[in-house]
Image (cartoon, helix red, strand yellow):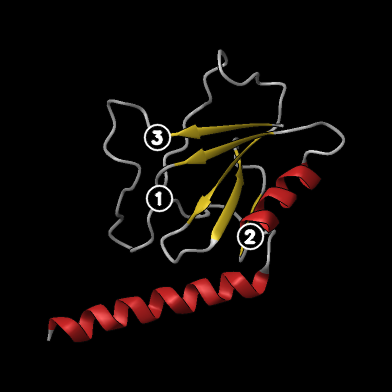
C-alpha cells in the first residue's frame, strides 16, 4: 500500500475543484488522471478524504466504485477490500470532495450526510433573515 497526500486534484488551468450547476447545489469534484510517474496505472488507486459534512469518502480513481463512511478506517478498509488481491494506492486530497458516483459504503451515513446538508442549508437561510 502506498499513501500519497495531494494538495490539489484538479488541472492547474481549471478553477478550483468545485463547480456549481444551476440545477444542483452539490459540489462536483474534478478528478484528473493520476500522474504515471507517481502511481502506475496498473495499481488500483483510491481517493480517501472528507466531504463537506465531515464524513469520510472513498472513491476509486477512475470512478468505478466508492462509498461514504463514518470512520476513516472504514474508508481505508473499503479500498483494501475492493482492490483485493492486489494492494492499492491511497491518495489523501487536502480539499473536501463529494462522492459523485453510487454509494457502495454505509447507506445510513449517506442518509445522515443528506440530512446534515439540508439542515446546514436551512440554518444558513434562517441566519440570512
User: Quadrant location of residue 117?
Assistant: bottom left
Residue 12 position within the rendered picture, expressed as x and y whole percent measured from the top left? 31, 26
Q: Residue at x 53, y 25 (%)?
A: 34
The label shown at residue 65 is none
Query: Which quadrant does the C terminus fall into?
Result: bottom left
Q: In which quarter of the image is residue 73?
A: bottom right
Along the viewing direction, whichever of 24 and 79 lies nearer the viewer: 79
User: Marks 1 and 2: in contact by CB < 8 Å?
Assistant: no
Secondary structure of the residue carrying tag 2 is loop
Q: Residue placed at 44% from the left, 77% from the top?
A: 116
Looking at the image, tell me whether mark 2 or mark 1 is earlier in sequence order: 1
Chain-order first, disc 1 or disc 3: 3
Q: How crowded is mark 1: few (under 14 residues within 10 Å), some or many (20 or more)?
A: some
**Do the CB atoms of the residues marked 2 and 3 lie less than 8 Å apart?**
no
In the image, what residue occupies the spot 31% across and 48% down? 19
- Residue 121, position as x, y percentages in the image: 31, 76
Quarter where residue 10 is shown: top left
Viewed as shown, does residue 82 lie left or right of 116? right
Q: In this view, does 74 lie above or below 122?
A: above
Q: Name the residue under label 3.
A: 7
Q: Earlier in the sequence, mark 2 or mark 3?
A: 3
Vertical relation: 118 (above or below) 41 = below
**Residue extending farthest right:** 85
Residue 124 vertical position relative to residue 3 in the rendered view, above or below: below
User: Are there few (<14), some (14-19), or many (20+) residues within 10 Å of tag 2?
Assistant: some
- Name the residue rendered at 78%, 32% in the picture: 87
Reading the image, the residue beneath label 2 is 103
Residue 54 place in picture, x, y as percent: 47, 64
User: Which residue is tagged 1?
Assistant: 28
Q: Quadrant of the N terminus?
A: top right
Camera-nearest label, 2 or 3: 3
Amino acid at each position: 500500500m502506498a499513501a500519497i497526500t495531494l494538495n490539489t486534484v484538479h488541472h492547474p488551468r481549471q478553477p478550483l475543484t468545485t463547480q456549481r450547476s444551476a440545477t444542483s447545489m452539490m459540489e462536483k469534484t474534478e478528478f484528473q488522471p493520476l500522474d504515471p510517474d507517481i502511481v502506475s496505472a496498473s495499481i488500483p488507486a483510491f481517493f480517501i478524504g472528507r466531504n463537506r459534512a465531515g464524513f469520510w469518502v472513498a472513491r476509486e480513481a477512475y470512478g468505478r466504485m466508492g462509498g461514504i463512511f463514518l470512520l476513516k478506517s472504514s474508508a481505508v478498509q473499503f479500498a483494501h477490500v475492493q482492490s483485493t488481491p492486489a494492494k492499492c494506492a491511497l491518495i489523501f486530497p487536502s480539499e473536501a470532495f463529494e462522492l459523485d458516483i453510487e454509494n457502495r459504503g454505509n447507506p445510513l451515513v449517506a442518509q445522515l450526510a443528506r440530512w446534515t446538508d439540508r439542515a446546514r442549508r436551512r440554518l444558513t437561510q434562517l441566519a440570512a433573515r
